[in-house]
Image (tube, coloured by chain):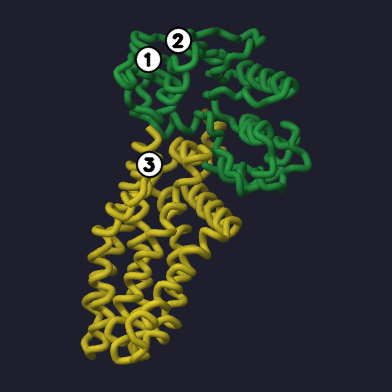
Amino acid sequence: MEAMSEKQTTTSAAFLATLKRDLLIAFKKKNDIVNPFMFFIIVVSLFPIGISPESDRLTEIAAGVIWISVLLASMLSMDNLYRADFEDGSLEQLLLSPHPLFFLVLAKNISHWLVSGLPVVLVSPLLAYMLALPEEAYLILVLSLLLGTPIMSLIGSIAVALTVGLGSRGLILAVITLPMSVPVLIFGTLAVQSTLNSQSPLGYLSLMLVMLSVSVSLAPLASAAALKISVN
Amino acid sequence: MLSARQLFCERDDRVLFQNLDFDLAEGQVLQVQGSNGSGKTTLLRILCGLNDSYAGSIRWYGQEIEEQAAAFFASLLYIGHRVGVSKVLTPIENLRWSCSLKQAVNDDQIMSALKEVGLRGFEESPCYTLSAGQQQRVSLARLLISPAKLWVLDEPFTTLDTKGVAQLESILQDQAQAGGAVMVTTHHQLTIPELSLLSLG
């Protein structure tokens, strides 16, 4: 037993190995990264065409349009999180690790956000420009997305973990995830709107920061418990 | 090392097994037998803690497994029907991850294990280009790297060729002789001297 425990990895090594593996898989299956990203850009670009190219009107709806599109794009990418692992048995191996599942699930969530959330945040100023959002609001938009997209990934992870064992999921993922994401949507758009009305967005941003800290500390626990139920 | 008492499991109102008692000692290979649907896979998953819809007690060195999950998982290696090999990754990338969930490994260990199971030259090919038997071999390479005391293997022989079957039998025998234990389901006739049988259904 002694010799064995010497060889055992530390939790941080298992965390890094999981993070590295998921990033590697994402870069080998480029569709999974590119599809939600393209979807986001396409949805946002439809609004000026469908509503009006007038910049006054667009300015009014810009923040909401971007936030809703981010939400929808994140729904599209969620399914990649555990599905393949469930099907090839890697998920069972993950659950049988001696390390706390919290950190391994968190590693998967972080990797998922890096490939699906971060690109959307980075391209958002470009789309904000297209929707005639005034320049002073760019920074707040990016900040609010930086805080909000990881929350969506973490919440979505719980729903995916719960439904990964079901054969046909259809809309159930959206039914579970979207209501829980509404507060993020509200505070995210309000932060940008308040900047446009020359008010301070700090209150909304700090609320989002609180929501992010709560999700980081609790959502992986819920995901881990849900995964255990799904493989049962 | 592992003892199960009064195990009872029911699935969809059908009793799979009841009053099931068995012990697994160091140096033993236990083959679980039974017809299709008799609950072999369910039994293995229960023992690994992947399935908790059972009644009874499972002890690992005298202590219930739920009470010492981390220590138990550290000495357990499970390979199920779904072997845990990601199709987009190469064998070496797969093993880097699945091994490092349990213990520290370096690439030399992985390379020599892959060579041992006959995957030399395939180390860098994505697993979707490998055959089912070769993918099974990727997961079996973990047996050569793992220091785990207890191996739980669900139908590890199914996709292997005759040479692979002989090799796996000798790997199992080595594990038993080194003081480990193996629990395995298969319909295959095993010729290991340490073998004992458990029949279900």
Which residue was labeled with disc 2? B200
x, y percentage for residue A59?
Answer: 31, 87
Q: CA distance from mark 1 to mark 3?
A: 24 Å
Q: Amino acid at mark 2?
A: Leu
Which residue was labeled with disc 1? B16
Q: Is residue B77 visible?
A: no
Q: Are marks 3 and 2 on the same chain?
A: no
Report the chain shown in green: B
The residue lying at 68 percent from left, 25 percent from top is B160
Q: A81 left or right of B179?
A: left
x, y percentage for residue A185?
Answer: 27, 69
**Of labels 1 and 3, the one closer to you:** 1
Which residue was labeled with disc 3? A227
Q: CA distance from mark 3 to mark 2?
A: 29 Å
Is the residue A70 above or below the residue B18 in the image?
A: below
Q: Amino acid at mark 3?
A: Leu
x, y percentage for residue B162?
Answer: 73, 20
Q: CA distance from mark 2 to mark 1?
A: 8 Å
Q: B106 left or right of B83?
A: right
Between residue A208 and residue A80, name the one nearer to us.
A80
Q: Amino acid at mark 1?
A: Leu
Between residue B162 and residue A96, name the one nearer to us.
B162
Give SS at disc 1: strand
**Dot placed on the residue nearer the N-terminal end, 2 or 1:** 1
The residue lying at 27 percent from left, 67 percent from top is A184
